[in-house]
Image (cartoon, rainbow, N blue to C red):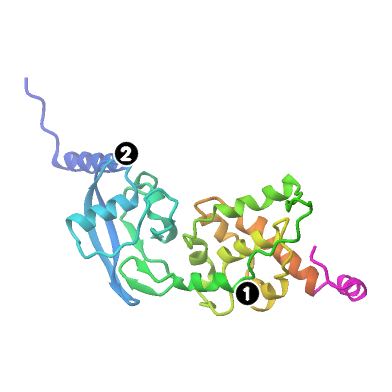
């Protein structure tokens, strides 16, 4: 006995449902929209490529580059979430391409990949992030106090040591810089150093051995007042550094205590300025 043939519409519906199911478990063809262009101009180009379970966005981009777009410019290095080179905007959000699994993205819509928006566009998915490397030398370097002991060593409370360890996890992917509205939307690069370097300044200011005072620079030269603590930088950090609560807010408090506290000003007038 022969089974009755299915209606064409039912077959089409089954095929479509199966395709969505395959994509949801990481199999089959996926659609991608990659930004192509140079020097700030360009447009999205659509690609389709086969994907497998466990693939990340960088895998798919490299596959497209190898098979369909040999001239596609994309920056990457370690492919392990430690070098920060493959930063981009995936479905409109700053992410590392090597740490964004396709399984975690909607299977029924194209995956869009475009360059970071806070920095000058070079070509395709590559931006010029050299501004960040010019910012860092402007911050006063680590300046240790004199040793406590005759043998040239220091005595430090372990809690003070642990407080700054979180900030050392930064891989300088600059995703926090990219998502910050002060840099991304208002382009105040000459007035604001951005979350990454506020973290760097916090690591120095809160170090138990450091004696340099960077509070006036934070207020006048580094634009800490521009930050309105939206916590968007914390949300995109691939190293899960608590940028806003543990770095920026304590720095803001130090700046306020130094420049806007009348009682503190009176005390300093009497005994002279001291670093807390």
The answer to the question of whether label 1 and label 2 lie on touching residues, with beta carbons closer than 8 A, is no
Q: Is residue 193 left or right of residue 248?
A: left
The count of marks equals 2
Q: Residue 25 carries which label?
A: 2
The answer to which quarter of the image holds residue 27 is: top left
**Residue at horizontal 38%, vertical 69%?**
127
Is any atom of residue 252 visible in this view?
yes
Q: Residues within 10 Å of mark 1 (few under 14, many from 20)?
A: many
**Residue at horizontal 29%, vertical 43%?**
23
Looking at this view, is 62 or 17 the one in front? Answer: 62
Is any atom of residue 100 visible in this view?
no
Q: Position of residue 234 (x, y in %)?
A: 57, 56
Q: Position of residue 177 (x, y in %)?
A: 51, 66
Report how far apart the C-alphas of labels 1 and 2 lie in the structure.
46 Å
Q: Position of residue 73 (x, y in %)?
A: 28, 65
**Residue at horizontal 10%, vertical 25%?**
3
Q: Position of residue 112 (x, y in %)?
A: 34, 59
Q: Residue furthest front?
A: 151
Q: Is residue 127 left or right of residue 66?
A: right
Q: Which mark is residue 222?
A: 1
Q: In this view, does 262 lie to the left or right of 80?
A: right
- Point out the tag, 1 or 2, that comes first from the N-terminus: 2
Closest to the camera, between mark 1 and mark 2, is 1
Query: Eyeballing the image, is 221 above or below 180?
Result: below
Which region is colored magenta? 260-276
Quarter in which the C terminus is drawn: bottom right
The answer to which quarter of the image holds residue 71 is: bottom left
Label 2 sits on a secondary structure element that is: loop
Query: Eyeballing the image, is 122 above or below 245?
Result: below
Quarter in which the N terminus is drawn: top left
Looking at this view, is 175 or 265 the one in front? Answer: 265
Looking at this view, is 230 or 55 the one in front? Answer: 55
């Amino acid at each position: 006995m022969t089974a009755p043939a299915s209606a064409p519409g039912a077959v089409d519906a089954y095929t479509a449902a199966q395709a969505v199911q395959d994509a949801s478990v990481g199999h089959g063809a996926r659609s991608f929209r990659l930004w192509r262009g140079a020097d700030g101009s360009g447009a999205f180009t659509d690609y389709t490529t086969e994907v497998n379970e466990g693939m990340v966005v960088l895998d798919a981009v490299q596959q497209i580059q190898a098979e369909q777009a040999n001239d596609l410019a994309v920056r990457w290095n370690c492919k392990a979430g430690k070098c920060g080179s493959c930063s981009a905007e995936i479905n409109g959000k700053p992410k590392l391409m090597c740490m964004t699994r396709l399984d975690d993205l909607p299977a029924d819509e194209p995956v869009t990949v475009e360059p970071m928006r806070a920095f000058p566009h070079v070509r395709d998915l590559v931006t010029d992030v050299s501004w960040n490397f010019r910012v860092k030398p402007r911050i006063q370097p680590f300046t240790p106090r004199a040793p406590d002991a005759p043998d040239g060593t220091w005595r430090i409370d372990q809690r003070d040591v642990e407080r700054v360890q979180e900030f050392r996890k930064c891989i300088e992917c600059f995703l926090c810089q990219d998502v910050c509205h002060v840099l991304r939307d208002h382009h105040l690069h000459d007035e604001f150093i951005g979350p990454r370097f506020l973290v760097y300044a916090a690591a120095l200011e809160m170090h138990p051995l450091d004696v340099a005072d960077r509070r006036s620079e934070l207020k006048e030269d580094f634009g800490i007042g521009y930050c309105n603590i939206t916590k968007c930088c914390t949300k995109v950090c691939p190293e899960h550094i608590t940028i806003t609560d543990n770095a920026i807010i304590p720095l803001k408090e130090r700046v306020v205590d130094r420049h806007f506290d009348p009682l503190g000003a009176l005390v300093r007038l009497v005994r002279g300025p001291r670093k807390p």
